[in-house]
Amino acid sequence: MSMEQKAGTRLIVKDVSKTFYQKKIEPHHVVDKVSLEVKDNEFLVLLGPGHCGKTVLLNIVSGLMPPDEGSVYLDGEKITKPNPKIGMVFQKLGLMPWKTVIENVEIGPKLSGINVKTRRERAEYFIDLVGLKGFENSYPHQLSGGMKQRVGIARAYTNDPEILIMDEPFGQLDAQTRYNMQNEISRISEHEKRTIIFVTNNIEEALYLGDRIILFTECPARVKEIYDIDLKRPRDMIDPEFLRLRKMISNNTDLAL
Amino acid sequence: MNNNNLLKKGRRMGDLKYMILSVISVLTFLLIWQLLVIFGVLSTRTIAAPTQVLVTFFEKFYSTAPDGATIFTNIAVSLKVSLTGFFSAIIIGTPLGMLMGWYKPLDRFIRPLFEIIRPIPPIAWIPLTILWVGIGLGAKAMIIFFSAFVPCVINSYTGIKLTSQVHVSVAKTFGASNFKIFRTVGVPSSMPMAFAGIRIALGNSWGTLVAAELLAANAGLGYMIMMGRQFVRPDVIILGMLTIGILGFIFTWIFTKIENVVVRWRTL
Amino acid sequence: MKKTAAYDQKRRPIKKILNSLLPFVSITCLFLLWFYASNINPDLVPSPASTWERLIQLFVKPVNKMNLFGHVWASLQRVFIALACATVLGVTVGVMIGWSKTFKAIFGTLFELIRPIPPIAWLPIIIMWFGIGEFPKILIVFIGTFMPIVVNTYTGIRLVMPLHLDVARMFNASNRQLLFEVAIPSALPPIFAGIRNATSSGWMTVLAAEMIASKAGLGFLITRGMDYFDVPLILVGMLAIGIVGALLAIITEFIERLLCPWNKKLEQD
Ligand SMILES: Nc1ncnc2c1ncn2[C@@H]1O[C@H](COP(=O)(O)OP(=O)(O)O)[C@@H](O)[C@H]1O
Ligand SMILES: [Mg+2]
């Protein structure tokens, strides 16, 4: 069941494949023999075009969906079901409309049976950290897109995961908000050191945030290239080195991203 | 690959399992019912065994006891009444709702009258209708009309109100007259809603029919079960209830088919 | 072009006033029609005045030892008791068949087979089983209210978003928690819509039950009016039925707003 691993490696994805079979439709091969490693405390970015199978891969990594082939190991243990050590910010958020902001944020500790006082305190802390103080008792439908995204992030942090997966968290936002949120996530991740797996289809975003970038092919998702990004932080999007890397990755992708 | 096929097969086996479970559950229900009657736990004066109901069903092909008509006559009478009321409600209610939704003055004129009628359940009209019109076909059709009229109006009204303003503006730029826009844009786009209203109307009119026939009739399925009670014939009552249920089910089924054909463009 | 604009501007205020008067015009027309009809045949169509008189008289000389409020309360009581039982049982059954495939196979099919029978069609056999006391009437109303609540609860549970379940699973929720923390709360709006439908269906069913066999209630009142050829009494009864029905609808919607504040659909209305 277990697997040997190098020091400093938290998560290993080994030869994972997934195909969907549906009635009357050709089998849809979505993830193809993906292998990758996630190091402790790194900010790893998975970069790939839309509908290439990134979300499916994440669902497999998080244990929500079984792979057809291959396996995922967390600290040497095979993942077969969701693990509280892994947190997820869902692409479509999935905030519960019947819960207020704070009730949404504290859902993780609540489900693990932590008492009201403790979990409220934790939730307050992260609501404050993502800049939503004062909106604790609002309902999600009263918030803007960027604010909802912050709730999703606070919710994942409040459960105190060791590895945090963020699935295209800023995909739905307008350019300005997106830029602000990139700064925010940069700030938050400095503040609350975690291993982060961040998914995006945007090259600038990947370069702005990532310690390492794994580039995927079009559907089915396959690892195409791995880049180590050694730019100093905070990063500057018009720094010549930044632009050089951007061009290099851009030339290597199948689609104009 | 293999793995997934196995999974699929597993799911199909699961479906089969649940289907078998449903069948067993229904059969068990019928069996217990039958046994309770056979062993006299339940008196035959208050309930009839499933087999007895089946026998009565065939008997009622020609027998007119206890209500004075065969089952087919009763079905025919009920159908005639309910369809008369139902179709008049569609023919009057649906266009009325659409026109009200489109033409403001008409809306303002009719709305108050409609709001007065709306909260009164159709059944409450029965005494007044009996005094005014008697207990013939007309009276019952009128009560059923009331039950079907309200949802027809409300839904086609809402459907028209939801007409996309963009489509209307496009039609306007082509210089179409207001009535033409109503006909070519408003009416078709409100069709799905109108049909949803007619579906509610269908259920209402079938339910109200029974009430009308229980209270004021000399034939029909409702009358048949009422007579079944008077002559202590539980078999006739249960047969009547089942017939009413099955016919209601068939109507809804036919209606769904028609709806699918007429509102096909909705999915396109 | 310019001319029409000016023309429109001039005409618009008048048109507006006419428009705002229309509701009053239509109500007036209704009353005129009523007066006219009551002049022609006062026996079949009593005048508004005599209807009003009958209403007053109902308090002075009660029908069957109860004034109007007594009868309203008699009907309401039956609806409330039945509705309370139907809500508890209906939500439970709906949740069970929505959540568990096994329950659905066992009870869902039986329920689907019984459902097409209109609640009123149960009247004769229930009277036969239980006589004409209070219980059979409440039972009939229960059948009328139980069905919409089960159907809506079931649908609501089936329509819970898989994403919401995934979110909770991600936080290690147990099956029980998935049901009570996610599925049931997310089904609350459809459940309330079901209770709203049930209330109006129950109000109608109680009338039917009272019209067929009862000594109290609004349904009894209007059949009494019919038996004694007391048309004003029928009109008073119908009026009360309409008003109480409308109030019930308003109250259930108010409660729904209170208990489901996140329900956007209600807010937009
Ligand atoms: N549960 C599923 N059943 C069938 N097809 C799916 C399922 N989930 C995802 N897909 C398909 O897999 C492909 C990849 O989806 P996804 O992983 O969401 O892409 P993205 O890279 O944009 O996150 C899409 O074409 C999608 O339609
Ligand atoms: Mg995705």
Image: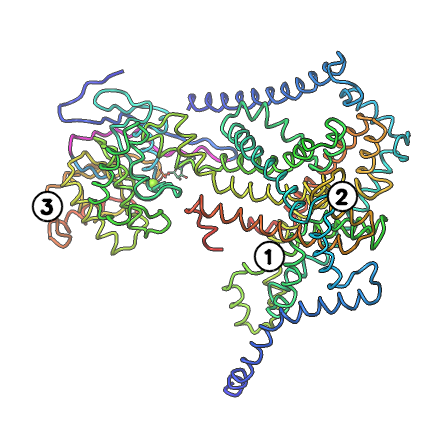
Measure the alpha-carbon separation of dots 1 and 2: 28 Å
Please indicate whether residue B214 sits to the left or right of residue A112 in the image.
right
| Nearest to the observer: residue C231 or residue C103 | C231
Q: Is residue C5 above or below residue C32?
A: below
Q: Residues within 10 Å of mark 1 (few under 14, many from 20)?
A: many
Checking the image for residue A8, the label placed there is none
* Image point (58%, 37%), residue name: C83
Magenta stretch secondary structure, dominant: strand
Residue A31 among magenta residues: yes
Q: Which residues are magenta?
A: A25-41
Q: Amino acid at mark 1?
A: Ser
| Nearest to the observer: residue C103 or residue B268 | C103
Residue highlighted by disc 2? B209
Tell me which chain the residue with mark 3 is part of.
Answer: A
Q: Quadrant of ligand 1?
A: top left
* Image point (41%, 46%), residue name: C262
* Image point (42%, 35%), residue name: C162
Mark 3 secondary-structure assignment: loop
Residue highlighted by disc 3? A233
Q: Position of residue C167 (x, y in %)?
A: 35, 35
Measure the alpha-carbon separation of dots 3 and 1: 57 Å
Q: Amino acid at mark 2?
A: Leu
Q: Residues within 10 Å of mark 3 (few under 14, many from 20)?
A: few
Measure the alpha-carbon separation of dots 2 and 3: 77 Å
Identify the residue at the far top of this view. Answer: B39
Q: Amino acid at mark 3?
A: Arg
Residue highlighted by disc 1? B190
Q: Position of residue B13 (x, y in %)?
A: 53, 20
Q: Nearer the viewer, mark 2 or mark 3?
A: 2
